[in-house]
Amino acid sequence: TETRTVVAGIGKECAPEQLLGRQVVVVSNLKPAKLMGVPSQGMVLAASVDGAPCLLHPASPVPNGTRVK
């Protein structure tokens, strides 16, 4: 697997320490985009519940980099 920088607008709902060690679904086949002044190389998938992000994640651990089908 490779390391990527991904910018996501989830800071109001998720503290960084809540994400440590957590797996999330990331779309990585997008062109890089500059978001909030930072180059982003992917997009974290989330549902919106009453306007708040609800991060999508695997039901059980999977190897990092596993493709979503």
Image (tube, helix red, strand yellow):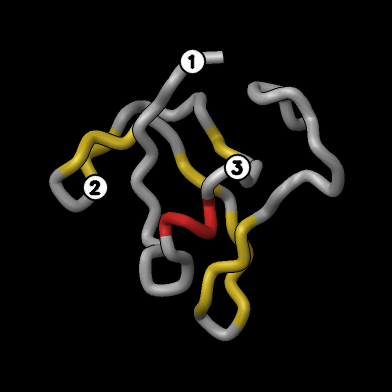
Q: How far apart are marks 3 and 1 (CA)?
A: 16 Å
Closer to the camera in the image, 64 or 44: 64
Give the mark, 3 or 1, whose residue is nearer the N terminus: 1
Q: Which amino acid does label 3 sit on?
A: Gly
> Label 1 is placed on what type of residue?
Glu
Q: Are marks 3 and 1 in contact (CB under 8 Å)?
A: no
Q: Quadrant of residue 41?
A: top left
Amino acid type shown at disc 2: Leu
Q: Mark 2 points at which residue?
A: 35
Q: Name the residue under label 1.
A: 2
Q: Which of marks 3 and 2 is in front?
A: 3
For the image shown, how many numbered marks are present on the structure?
Answer: 3
Which label sits in the foreground, 3 or 1? 3
Quarter of the image for the N terminus: give it.
top right
- Residue drawn at the location 39% of the way across and 53% of the way down: 8
Residue drawn 85% across the image and 42% down it = 60
Q: Depth check: 26 or 2 in front? A: 2
> SS for tag 1?
loop
Q: Mark 3 points at which residue?
A: 21
Query: Mark 2 or mark 3, which is nearer the start of the sequence?
Result: 3
In the rendering, at what x and y percent does residue 12 appear? 38, 73
